[in-house]
Amino acid sequence: MTIYDLTGDSIFCFYYATSIDLADGLKEGMSVKRGDVIGYVGTTGMPLPNTLTCTWRFSGGPEKRWWEGTAIDAIPID
């Protein structure tokens, strides 16, 4: 299950990949804000048992070609 969330100006993209399901009621084109539930994580596909996973990637730039943007490691951003 994947979600691409573009900023209002379409410069930046937040990419989420969950291993279980998207949140109920989440639909293409709808706006989301900080704190909204967008999906649920699970343990499928992980090499370690009982390990939750969610892939998150942030990319983009002023040229508005986020699909060619550089992925930024989110771990140091805390």
Image (spheres, rainbow, N blue to C red):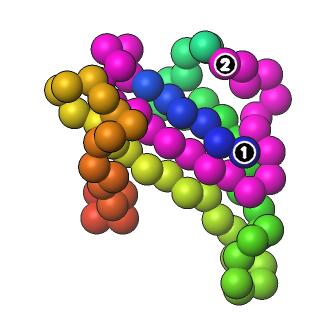
The quarter of the image holding the C terminus is bottom left
Which mark sits nearer the N-terminus, 2 or 1? 1
Q: Quadrant of the N terminus?
A: top right
Q: Residue at x 77, y 79 (%)?
A: 50
Residue 21 picture location, percent across and down: 80, 45
Q: Is residue 63 left or right of residue 53?
A: left
Q: Which residues are magenta?
A: 7-28
Q: Is residue 60 above or below residue 45?
A: above
The residue lying at 49 percent from left, 52 percent from top is 56
Name the residue tied to disc 2: 28
Residue 1 marker: 1
Magenta segment: does it hold 38?
A: no
Identify the residue at horizontal 54%, vertical 33% (top origin).
4
> Mark 2: which secondary structure?
loop
Q: For label 2, count other residues whose C-alpha is less than 10 Å away and answer few (under 14), some (14-19) or many (20+).
A: few
Image-quadrant location for residue 69:
top left
User: What percent of the width, then of the height, locates residue 41?
Assistant: 72, 56
Determine whether, in the image, residue 38 is placed left or right of residue 70: right
